[in-house]
Amino acid sequence: MTDRQLILQLKQRDRNALKAVYIDYKTEFLKFMSRYNADTDILEDIFQDALIVLFENAQAGKLDALKSTLKTYLFGTGKFMLFKHFRDARKEVPTEETYLFDKYEQAVIEDVFEDEGLSNYQAKLVANFKKLGDKCREILELFYIQGMKLDEITLTQGYENKDVTKSQKSRCLKSLKQLIGNSNG
Amino acid sequence: MDKDELINGYFEGSLSESQLEEFNSLLEKDVAFTSEFEFQKELQDSLKKQERQEIKELFSNLKDENGKTETKVIKLRPWLAAASIALLAGLAWWFLFNTGEINTEELYAANFAPYDNVIQPIERGDQLEDLKTKAFTAYENEEYPKALELFKELQGKHNEAYIEFYKAMVLMQLNKQEEAIPLLEGYIEKGGELKDRASWYLALAYLKLNRLEDCKEQLNLRISSGTYKTAAAKKLLSQLE
């Protein structure tokens, strides 16, 4: 599969594409990064985090005009994270050219790097989200995770117009709040 | 622009500078607006984190499938050997005898690893040593008898559903599958948040006790749900059949 095809699939949140990237680059990534003297466990974690960043930044359209290869982007993300890890552990950070990420991309990298999992409240949100109907889960996922605009959702999901989409979304949020309220009481 | 549209615009990243100003000033003075926005932001964060967690599970399944497993828990390392022996033995049976004999012990060892602590993140050096933190610290440090006591104590005070799940994990680690099974069954029945995980561990507990029909039934549930450990369940089921 070409990089372009992979990126298109990642944008659609296709996890199989992500699996393919994982399998293609894992060995090479670990080998490449081993020059920086980090534990393999840490490198494996960083590899997984870097793939998640790739996944999220692809969805945000950050890879649409990628000038380098997907591999360069992935390895650049890994390096950025490893250097951040070194800085946090007060170790020496190699001085070398790194891939230039814009502010948004850096924020995603840091967010993934620092993600400590769901809080109790967030776990409850997710559990109740899963109880919503298909239509609701779909529209909320497209909007909040995939970052689609209401106009785009209207077009791709066949809603009559933007107002219909908007009120559907707000109905779904309301149901979610009700579910959470019920599970509290 | 109404308030809903301002919030939508924020998430779409489509607010103009003046709209952004309006948005920020509402955040300062309009309580209802702020709480609506925060709810949606929290939802976004939660869904993203959940997706990341699912992706990591996918990766760890991939790792398992590649047979290059290296569990984080050091104590489990000897089981890796067991895992490869189980695989080799499995293949040998298949090719040479195909007798259908199953070594449940080895299959169990190859598949069981205690579930991560997803309830109480532990900050090392944390001052606040409450009971919950203590229990999960013992769990993470593999001090299972101690963890069991602490979970029991915790249950006496809070009785939250997840405690049953982790108590079951500890019991399985201590080779007390008979005691773990009713806990897991109860937890699943109550619809606990980790019920998919619980069903996987229930299948393994049945396996350990050689209750193969019950084990297969749980594995089939895993496969049809398509959520947690689907690939591992398929593999194990094919080894059992």
Image (cartoon, rainbow, N blue to C red):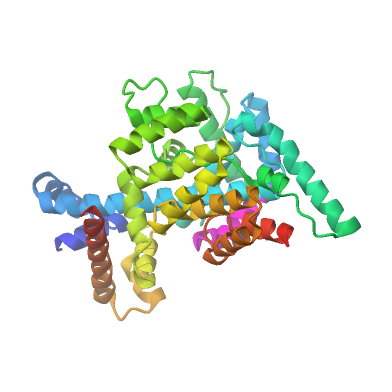
Which span of residues is magenta-colored?
A: A7-24
Residue A10 inside the magenta-drawn segment: yes
Residue B149 sits in quarter:
top left
In the image, residue B88 lies at what x, y percent? 82, 47
Q: Name the residue at the bottom extreme.
A: A160
In the rendered image, the quadrant that contains the N terminus of chain B is bottom left
Task: Decide: is A23 above or below B122.
Answer: below
Residue A159 image point, x, y percent? 33, 78
Residue B74 or residue B96, whichever sits in front: B96
Rendered view: A170 above or below B25: below
Does residue A115 show up?
Answer: yes
**Residue visible at 67% across and 27% down in the picture:** A35
- Residue at the outermost right position: B96
In the rendered structure, the answer to whether residue B129 lies left or right of residue A95 reads left
Q: Which residue is drawn at 33% across and 70% down?
A: A151
Q: Is residue B160 left or right of residue B175?
A: left
Looking at the image, which is closer to me, B14 or B2?
Answer: B2
Q: Does the magenta stretch include residue B202?
A: no
Q: Residue at x 89, y 58 (%)?
A: B97
In the image, residue B15 above or below residue A113? below
Image x and y of residue A181, in percent:
21, 57
Magenta residues, dominant SS class: helix
A179 sits left or right of A9 in the view: left
Whether residue B122 is visible, yes or no, is no
Q: Considering depth in this image, is B2 or B50 the residue closer to the camera? A: B50
